[in-house]
Image: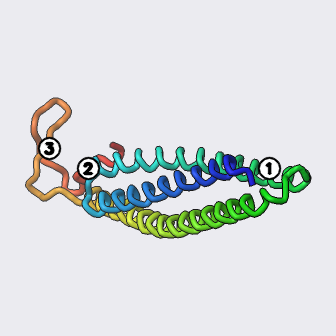
Amino acid sequence: MNSSVSDTLLATLLHTEEEVGRLKETLQAQLSAVRDQDPAALGETSEAVSQIARRLESLLARKAREAGLVSTTLQSRSATTDVGIEELPDDAARASALAGEIAEVESRIRLHAEETHRLYEDLAFALHFAAKLDADLMRSVWDARQPGGATVYTPDGATGQAGRNQGMLNQLG
């Protein structure tokens, strides 16, 4: 195995692992922002998630290219016989070690991805619940009626008696 090609693939996988870890942390922060009802933090974490997702897309495309290059290198290497027999044990040992490292990193990435997916599902539920609660609250305010002695501003700027069946909010906005 060409060590520089496989080392590059390993480096890409390690960077991917870091980004998936960042995504997991950011989703946790986003979930906390929803629970704490902090719209500023929610906006910041949403932007961060978007940026991390773009970087992950790029890394996954790079990983696919590099994995293809490793495969091509292995195929071309097996077809040639110009490697001396004394070089094979070192090359095979190095290839085996790199393959083990790559498999280990991919396993950790899958574990992070599963944890991140669970956080994503929790966040989706929390956001759906918050949106439903918001809609229910707005509906209750729209349906609220003014008390009998309430006054309102008329179009000419004066105050007048509110109608009994008039809602507190203009539903048209």
* Residue 74 left/right relative to 153: right
What's the residue type where badge 2 is placed? Leu
**Residue located 17% across and 56% down the image:** 146
**Residue located 48% across and 48% down the image:** 52
Image quarter (top left, top right, bottom left or bottom right) of the N terminus: bottom right
Could you tell me if the residues under marks 3 and 2 are in contact, i.e. CB atoms within 8 Å?
A: no
Asked which secondary structure carries label 3, the reply is strand
Residue 139 visible from this viewpoint: no
Badge 1 crowding class, 10 Å Cα cut-off, few under 14, some 14 to 19, many 20 or more, is some
Query: 88 above or below 173?
Result: below
Q: CA–CA distance between discs 1 and 3?
A: 80 Å
**Residue located 29% across and 46% down the image:** 170
Could you tell me if the residues under marks 1 and 3 are in contact, i.e. CB atoms within 8 Å?
A: no
> Residue 152 bears which disc, if any?
3
Residue linked to disc 1: 73
Residue linked to disc 2: 169
Q: Earlier in the sequence, mark 1 or mark 3?
A: 1
Badge 3 crowding class, 10 Å Cα cut-off, few under 14, some 14 to 19, many 20 or more, is some
